[in-house]
Amino acid sequence: MKRVRFIFSIATLLPFVAGAQARPLYKDKNAPIEKRIDDLLKRMTLEEKILQTNQWTYGKNANINNIEASKKAVRPEIGSLIYRSTNPVFRNDIMRKAMEESRLGIPILMGFDVIHGYRTIFPIPLAQACSWNPSLVRQACAIAAKESKLSGVDWTFSPMVDVARDARWGRVAEGYGEDPYTNAIFAVAAVKGYQGEKLSDPYSIAACLKHYIGYSLSEGGRDYHYADVSPQTLWETFIPPYQAGVEAGAATLMSAFNDISGIPASANHYTLTEILKQRWKHNGFVVSDWGSIDNLIAQGYAADRKDAALKSFTAGVEMDMVDNVYVENLQQLIKENKISMDKLDDAVRRILRVKFMLGLFDKPYVEELPEKDRYYQPKGLAVAAKLAEESMVLLKNNNHTLPLSSAIKHIALVGPMVKDSVNLMGSWEGQGTPESVETLYEGFEKEFKNKVVLHYAKGCDFDGTDQSGFSEAIAAAQQSDVIIVCIGEMKKWSGENASRSTIALPSIQEQLVSALKKTGKPIALVLSNGRPVELGSLDSLSDAILEIWQPGIAGGSPLAGIVSGRLNPSGKLAITFPLSTGQIPTYYNMRQSARPKLGGYQDIATEPKYWFGHGLSYTTFSYAPARLSDTVLRKNKQLVAEVEVTNTGTVDGKETALWYIADPVASVTRPMKELKYFEKQDLKAGEKKVFRFVIDPVRDLSFPDANGFRHLESGDFYILINDQKLKFRLID
Ligand code: BGC
């Protein structure tokens, strides 16, 4: 009896003993993440750890042979892959290699540039900011995340939150404009959109704030160049969007290509470790930009690849994008005691943490749905159209040229952008395809079907000197009551490595508009571009100007809806349009000059063409006198500013109230005004609504010093709204 019981007990225990061996702690989805990482790190060899710091890419294009050939070469132990396929089956195959063919079964993090959409391409980020609608941007990012995840992507290299004030720099298209606060708000919206409530949610992907930091300051607007920034400006202008994004939970950051005042961003211990990891306690990881570790050699900061690996790794870049510098050198650097095991473990821990948080260990494979169930879902298309609509900015509208009167029966649609389906997507178009783009022409056809005759002529190319299409354009104009000219930039003119010495459009486009002007017909100019442009004579040649940016795949209908009056434009500029390239940099939050009335340009006006915040509507809004809850504010209290706005026109509209603070005297000089809050509301014709800004002194009235420590100084302040300026006093 006893014996039988003994045998029975062993038999009962066996599955548990075997289970304990087969199921290590790091594979237990119920164990705390940090414990799982501890367990996994203990099991990893040095080589396996180093491979986690390595990001690979395969193929240089979408050529299927190229992808397949390289897939075989992908080692199952790598930390991350730049994943360019759209096929979830392909992704799962690679992932299976990692899970089943590697010793420990660590999932590979699949990264891709999902910048403004995956297949459903939304307007470029610069346009998105002009919508002043962060909730719409969050929805767009969530849709992009879902389409990406369903195609196999776990991680996007977005959002770019580099405050940009030099429009010669092509990457101005990828960020949220010239203002730190605006960039911070949209950074948070994008991070929350991509990452969802939890990273482990089925359709969440990890975000990556880039390019940390100072990249937009590349001298002369030339990409990859030296960037000089004072610690003061770094803290007050460039850091806030990153800090906001980190506080919103961004899992990763990307270090930039540029040299920041002598210490390259990809080897900058101060920004990567002291600020990011020590002060902000960021617990995700930093990936280098493409080749930016090796670039330290060209920049004169590293002697060779080994030195580059040492400098970048010790500064705080945990993952090496594509360079293979870490794989080649970390082992030797550890052997020579130049890098400690603890440092390597910390880097690997950060990378593993993101993988655990994404749930990749527990659910490494993605659903394998057919394309029709992954892309272009009705909700995504609706958000794309809404965001395109809200990001369009009516810059000028003389004599109510727009919307077109219902008496108009013939419209000339002229210009190289009218039937274009490539350039409307803008740079970094993810996996967008021209076939999915609704052209401007198609939008007009739908809008004006059976009501108006459209007379199309291309007129000219985007560039060059060929005027042979002008006569056809003039003929189309002569048959019409109004001319809509759709011109602008090709998508390759902005984005990475796309700097321009002038932000004016090529003169052929101006010549076309000039020729059309001679017909005497009213001209509504529609601009599609990835940066603010110098308008030159285009401004005076046009009766109305509508900036549609690069609206993505669903821009045609919103444009046509605005032209017909079915929609009312509500975008406002998130970046100033200089009068000429020579005015760069000109931005609204400049500091006051020593001689405010002097120092202007002798040859041109000093005022830009259209300021940050400019944007017209088909209705009018009147602002009642704003009220403050008090004129004296204690540092530990709040102040409420309110203004009642009335839609005084005859059509419904949307108004964005931009609240600025001015601090006229401080121990560190302050910009003339700084945006601190904005709010967008719908107002029906005749309707009144109150816009409210609750001022929190620490958040809204303090400023950082050159070390990033905030100061709150008593004294007079102003709050600015529309054209009003109200004074209040901050006391202890
Ligand atoms: C760009 C990054 C991008 C990366 C990966 C780099 O050249 O600067 O913004 O995320 O490539 O494609």
Image (tube, helix red, strand yellow):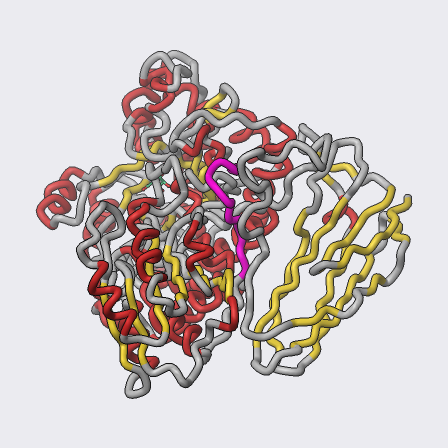
Looking at the image, which residue sits at the far bottom? Answer: 450
Judge from the rendering whether residue 383 lies leftward or rightward of residue 441; answer left or right: right
Of all residues, the one furthest to the left in this rendering is 65
Does residue 623 show up? Answer: yes
- Residue 6 seen in this snapshot: no
Residue at left offset 59%, top offset 56%: 613
Q: Position of residue 114 (x, y in %)?
A: 35, 52
Q: Name the dominant secondary structure of the magenta segment.
A: loop
Q: Position of residue 84 (x, y in %)?
A: 24, 49
Along the line of sight, which residue is nearer the eye, 597 or 679?
A: 597
Task: State which quadrant residue 407 falls in.
Answer: bottom left
Query: Residue 465, relative to residue 477: is it above or below?
Result: above
Query: Which residue is rendered at x = 32% and y = 73% of the image?
Result: 377
For the record, the magenta segment spans 572-584
The quadrant of the picture occupied by the N terminus is bottom left
Q: Position of residue 183 (x, y in %)?
A: 55, 49
**Closer to the camera, 154 or 169?**
169
Asked if residue 427 lies in the magenta stretch, the reply is: no
The quarter of the rendered structure image containing the C terminus is top right
**Which quarter of the rendered image does ligand 1 occupy?**
top left
Residue at point 36% right, 37% down?
499
Left or right of 118? Residue 458 is left
Q: Is residue 44 left or right of residue 193?
A: left
> Left or right: 114 with respect to 96?
right
